[in-house]
Amino acid sequence: MENKFYITTPIYYASGKPHIGHAFTTIYADILARYHKSLGKEVFFSVGMDEHGAKIAEKAKEENKSPQEFVDEISKSYIDTWSALNIEYSDFIRTTSQKHKETVNEFIKKIYASGDIYEGIYEGLYCVGCEKFLTEKELENGACPDHLTVPQKIKEKNYFFNLKKYLPEIERRIRNKELGIRPESRKNEILNIIDSGISDFSITREKKKVGWGIPFPYDDSQIIYVWADALVNYLSPKDFWPADLHVIGADINKFHAIFWPGLLLSARLPLPKNIFVHGLFTINGQKISKTVGNIIDPLDMIEKFGVDATRYLLLSQFPASEHGDIKETGFEVKYNADLANGIGNLFERVFTMIREYKIHLEARLLSRSLASKLEITDKNFKNYMDNFQLFEALREVLLFAKKLDGYITEIQPWVLAKNNDPKLEEVLNYLFSGIEKIIEWLKPFMPEKTKIAKDYAQKIKSGDYPKEKLGLFPRK
Ligand code: MSP
C-alpha cells in the first residue's frame, strides 16, 4: 500500500483505569492519525489493552474477580475514555482475543523455526509492577524506583530469545535510519544500551508462577512472557504492517527499539519505520501514583474544560522530547491565556469587525508580504507535524495568533474604518485568512471546536452573519 499510514499506541496494562499519562500518548497518536488523514492517506490507527501477566492476575485476585472479568471491566473503562476524548481509532486490540492469540502463536512458531529460542534457567530480580527483570544497578535502596517495591528473586526455567544474534543488525538499521528513533536523545539512549551489552531475554515464564497468559506451544509448563505477547499486537492489521509509527513513552523504549526489532528480524518481518518516544511527566512534581494520590482522571478534565481543551491542555504543557511536570492548577491559567483570551478572543474580535464594517470576503488577493507571513507559519507547522513534534507545531500556531493580535493593535482597523481607508478591506481579509489557517492547523488537535469555528467562518464569508457570538472558549 503506497499511500498508507499505520500508527499505534502502546497497549496499556489492564490493571487499572486510564489516567492522563495514558491519555497523553493516545491523544498524541490520534492527532498524528488525523493529520495524516488530512493529507489524504489511508490511515490505520490501532490502540488496545495488554491483558495478561502476573500483575493483572494479582489485581483480579485482590478484587475477587476472575482475570477475564477483571480485564473486561478495565478495558471498558479505556474504551469509554477514548470515546470521551474523541479518539478516532481503527481497531481496539485486546490480547485476550482469539485473533490475537492466533497471531502470537504464528509469530512464536516463526521465531522457533529460525532456531532463536533456547531453554535456560533465569535467575534474577523481577518487578511485577514493571513486568520486567531489573538489574541490581537499577534498584534504589533495594527497591524498584518506579514502584518502590522490593523485586522478587526468581529462579526458574525459561525459554530465551537469542537477541544477541540480531544486535549488530538492529544497530545498523538504527544508525542508517531504516529504523528511525526520535528524538535523537532517545536514539542515543538505545545505541548506548546496545554498546554496553544487553543479554538475551526470556520469552516465557513458568506457568505455575504466572498462570494468566498464552500457553507456550513447545512446553506445557510455560506461558509466553507478557512482552512477547503484547508487542505482537502491532501485527494484527496484517495488510498495514510495517507500522509507520509507534508512539510510546520513554519507559518502554528498550522493548520497542531493541526487543521488538530483534523478534521481527528473527520472524523475517519488516521493522517499523519510526518510533517516537515521548518523555514522561510527573504531576505536581511527583510520579503519577495511587499512593501519592495525584492521579488525574481524563474524564474529570473533560468535565471541567471540555474535550478539545483537554486535548490541547495535555499536549501544550512541555515539549514531548523532554520529561515534564504538570501542575494541576496550571490548566486553568493556560486555558484562559491560550484559548479564552488567546485564540477564542482573536476569532471573536475579527469576526465582530468584519460584521461591523461590512467587509466583503470574496477571494481577495493578499499583499505579497502578508501572504508570505502565512506561508512561513504554514511551512514551519507542517515541518513540525511531519517530524511528530506536536508541542512545537502548536507553539507555532499560538505564536501566529499572537502576531495577528499584535497586528490588530498596531494597525487599528477602527481608525481605518473611521477614515474610510480602503486598506481596511485588505487588513480584515488578511486577518480572516489567518483565522481560516489557524482553524485548519488546529483541526487534528481540536476537531470539534474547529468544526464549530469553521462553520461560523463559512457563514460570515457568505454574508449570512450569525446572530450569536461564536463563544468558542468561555473564560473559566
Ligand atoms: N503494557 C505495556 C505496553 C505494551 S506495548 C506493546 C505498558 N503499559 S502501561 O500501562 O504501563 O503504559 C505505559 C505507557 O503509558 C507509557 O509508555 C506512556 O505511553 C503512557 N504513560 C504512562 N504514564 C505516563 C506518564 N507519567 N507520562 C507520559 N506518559 C505516560 O507499559
Image: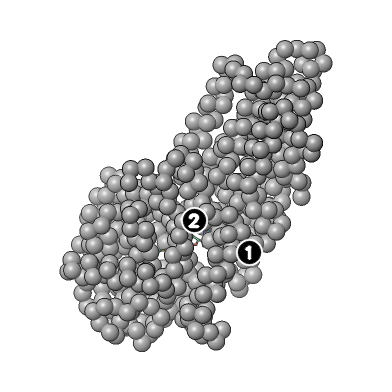
From the viewer's perspective, is 260 left or right of 282?
A: left
The residue nearer to you, when weighing 386 against 147, is: 386
User: Does the residue at mark 2 contact the one at mark 1 (Cβ under 8 Å)?
Assistant: no
Image coordinates for residue 2, horizontal then vertical, percent: 33, 43
Give the residue at mark 2.
89
| Amino acid at dot 2 | Tyr
The residue under label 1 is which amino acid type? Asp
| Quarter of image, res 73 | bottom right
Q: Residue at x 27, y 60 (%)?
A: 264
| Number of disc labels | 2
- Determine whether, in the image, residue 7 is placed left or right of residue 228: right
Q: Is residue 188 visible?
A: no
Label 1 neighbour load within 10 Å: few <14, some 14-19, many 20+: some
Residue at the disc numbered 1? 297
Cβ of mark 2 under 8 Å from ligand 1: the answer is no
Res 154 label: none
Q: In this view, does 210 lie to the left or right of 113?
A: right
Q: Which of marks 2 and 1 is in front?
A: 2
Q: In this view, does 145 lie to the left or right of 411?
A: left
- Residue in view at x 69 percent, y 36 percent: 456
Closer to the camera, 271 or 455? 455
